[in-house]
Image (cartoon, coloured by chain):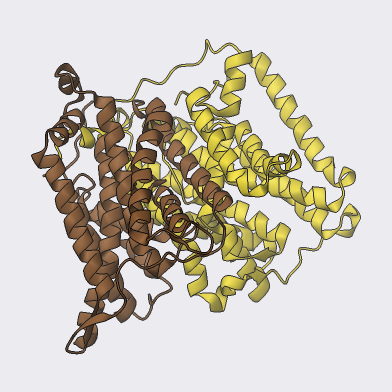
Amino acid sequence: MTLLIQRLFDGLSSGAVYAALALAIVLVFRATGTLNLAQGEMAMFTCFLAWKLADPAHGLGWPVVPAILLAMAVGLAGGAVIERVVVRPVEDRTDHLPIIIVTLGLMLAINALAGALFTTDVVRLPEVFPAGALRLGDVHLSYATIGLLAVLLVVSALIWALFQRTRIGLRMRASVDNPDSARLLGIRRSHMLMLGWGIAGALGALAAVLVAPQTFVHTGMLQGVLLYAFAAATLGGFTSVLGAVVGGLIVGVLQSLAAGYVGFIGNDLSLLVALVIIIAVLMVKPAGLFGRVDSSRL
Amino acid sequence: MNAGVPPGRTGTRAVNWSAAVVVLVLALALPALLPAFELSQAGSAVYLALAVLSMNLLTGLNGQLSLGHGAFVGIGAYTVTILVSDHGWSYPTAFVAGALLASAAGVVVALPALRLRGLYVALTTFGIGLVFPTLIQRFSSWTGGTGGKPVTAVYVPPSWLGLDIAQYAYVLSVLVLAVCLLVVHRVKGSRAGRLMQAIRDNDLVAEGFGVVVPRVKVATFALSAALAGLAGGLFALQHRFVSPGDFGLTMSIQLFVGMAIGGSVSVAGAVLGGMFLEYVPEVTERVGVPALYTPVIYGLVLALIVIFAPQGVVGLWHRLFRRRAAEVPAEPRPRTPELAVSTEKGAE
């Protein structure tokens, strides 16, 4: 029983990271209707930046929190610039092959740039949350887990409030839901798309620095995490902020339970869990838990 | 994406066929001309071209995406390696088994496509590409795990050919590629090929005309995966060593790059794509760009191609040097369902 609860908490802790990255994926999907395959690599790049700022030996030795905030700001700007410069020329094409190719190209390029500009070694980002754990009976609830969940809660509340309670959020929704009418009302749709990608970039940076204590910082740190985040977004229905958060937590818990209780899977095959979730959701309920059923017109 | 140049116009057709024969003869003559290392590079270009061809069939002809074709190449390579080394199978039968297994895996991957379109298939195949190496590591008692597995049995060339083992492997690879190129070319012009293209251009309309869309899609995926499996067999034949790192996401993405560069619709594009993947990293390194930056170049080239030459190099060639009058442009697709989702109101 203790072990079960412990595994649940572990699952929630990794689930919080998946949820954060899934949020980024959902924001991009809502803004431009595509999967950003480079989301993980963009996040990895900003995480390296945070390391460069914070590391006392190889970098500038900043305290870790300002370093992370600056990395998130760079993620925001970078996401917006990428949307404007490389995604914009292809995003209005009705075929989705071009945009997949472009995000794949980004994925390759950013990965290689990170290796070339920073390092191809595995490095360590200083921890944000204090070490140690809260003991509840035999269960250890580490401060890192509590911190992760708290950050996720705050961030998703902020995103929700942004979309539902601010004028800019209203404009973003309008330009996605009905681009033509939004334009007629004087909303600069292009700015809204840049903003969507930018916020996604910042969220990705946050997810990366949060997962860094477990994966460490290296150029491949988020490849697996990205698949979990895709699983989370799929489960949550790709268009829903709430879905991304719930999906992320569920995927985290499922992964932890499968690794713990299914001997065949163990730690080696835990990526398979993400893939199975994606395929199962797409086959059984393609709209996910919170998404809209898709329809198409001739 | 528009259809490629149709096979009509007998003049160009004859030129094309003679060009193909000349290229084939040249390729077969290479063992006599090139030293061992250069020949092994040419061999890599050959199996890469076959793998890119499998992507062309899937994407160019049928409009399906795969970001995980490295996995099917890997299935072919590992099947051949294991059957030949541990079970004493002959190479040809092992090749067939590898292609069949890869094809079966392709069916499993394509099944979600029965209910889904475009982006979602990209997602599942991306997952397969990522997961495949971990599967190899998990079943290390068969596959040799992370360290890889040598191919212990050699495919001995018949003595009258006067070729050494590596040269023989190269010549066989060229022949396999040539046959596969021909098969895909024939499929393109056949009734089956037209069904595939109808689905690519507009699956809903195709369905309206009575095309059983899921069956054609799954069959295309299976054929494509079989070709990828053959490419993997060639990999094992040439390198005589396989390891999980060879067939990871990197290879899948490389194949995608090769397809985009060669042009997804054309059979010749596959050969160009394979050569690009094999030789460009070397060329760039020789002109002073460190190997670390090669993917950056890939990325840039991809973006440029999408923006300026959506049909790849072959398409660009046609656009610049040939009349395209006979080409029937595909009707623009209606806004895809994926985009329709994003234009509807969000869930909150």
Residue closest to the far bottom: A138
**Percent x, y for residue A58?**
54, 60
Residue drawn at point x = 76 percent, y = 36 percent = B24
Residue B187, visible in the rendered structure = no
Using the image as rendered, state which of residue B209 and residue B335 is in the foreground: B335
Using the image as rendered, state which of residue B247 and residue B346 is in the foreground: B346
Q: Which color has been applied to chain B in this rendered view? A: yellow
Task: Classify A256 as above or below B320.
Answer: below
Residue A178 is left or right of residue B252, and the answer is left
Using the image as rendered, state which of residue B255 and residue A37 is in the foreground: A37
Residue drawn at point x = 59 percent, y = 74 percent = B144
**Percent x, y for residue B266?**
57, 30
**Number of marks in the rendered image:** 0
Residue drawn at point x = 33 percent, y = 34 percent = B211
Using the image as rendered, state which of residue A294 and residue B3 is in the foreground: A294
Q: Quadrant of the C terminus of chain A?
A: top left
Residue B288 is left or right of residue A122, and the answer is right
**Percent x, y for residue B337?**
25, 35
Task: Classify A241 as above or below A259.
Answer: above
Residue drawn at point x = 45 percent, y = 60 percent = A61
Task: Classify A14 as above or below A70.
Answer: below
Q: Quadrant of the N terminus of chain A?
A: bottom left
Q: Which color has been applied to chain A in this rendered view? A: brown
Residue A229 is left or right of residue B195, and the answer is left
**Which image quadrant is residue A193 in?**
top left
Residue B313, visible in the rendered structure = yes
Residue B98 is left or right of residue A3, and the answer is right
**Percent x, y for residue A90?**
40, 28
